[in-house]
Amino acid sequence: QVQLVESGGGLVQAGGSLTLSCAASGRIFGTNAMGWYRQAPGKQRELVAVITSGSNTNYADSVKGRFTISRDNAKNTVYLQMNSLKPEDTAVYYCNAKNVRVRNYDYWGQGTQVTVSS
């Protein structure tokens, strides 16, 4: 089993910044890909950013240039630095751990709320 605990969400004004953290514990592999997803009310969950074990990154077009994903393997933690926040970034943000080399290895955190006021 893997446990993912997000933190760092909150209320911020448009244009502000927040940094989300996701601490992983349990059955962790260095080959894990870690990702951040979000789900706004009435919408489907969508990918925000992903980082591979080799630190290759990929971002949703809507956050490119504003958000940065990073990982600290020594701390088993992944971060999402969010700058120039917009009201449309308001959502519950979820951390995900995935490993295509390990069967059924796909875990989610409980989510953290990010609210951006205009």
Image: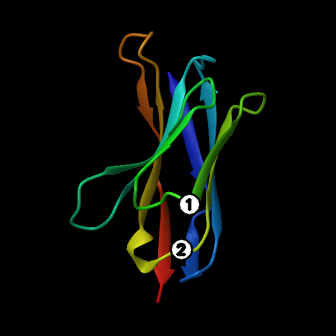
Compared with 76, 85 (above or below) is below
Camera-side residue of 14 and 96: 14
Compared with 46, 23 (above or below) is above
At mark 2, the secondary structure is loop
Would residue 86 be visible to someone looking at this image?
A: yes
Camera-side residue of 18 and 112: 18
Q: Which residue bears the numbered disc 1? A: 65
- Snapshot quadrant of residue 70: top right
- Snapshot quadrant of residue 13: bottom right
The first of marks 1 and 2 along the sequence is 1
Compared with 91, 16 (above or below) is below
**Mark 2, other Cα within 10 Å: few <14 / some 14–19 / many ≥20:** many
- x then y, percent, for residue 108: 43, 38
Q: Which residue bears the numbered disc 2? A: 85
Q: Amino acid at mark 2?
A: Leu
- x then y, percent, for residue 110: 46, 48
Compared with 18, 112 (above or below) is above
Q: Which mark is residue 25?
A: none
At mark 1, the secondary structure is loop
The residue at the point 56 percent across, 63 percent down is 66
Q: Amino acid at mark 1?
A: Gly
- x then y, percent, for residue 89: 43, 69
Q: Residue furthest left?
A: 42
**Mark 1, other Cα within 10 Å: few <14 / some 14–19 / many ≥20:** few
The residue at the point 37 percent across, 10 percent down is 103
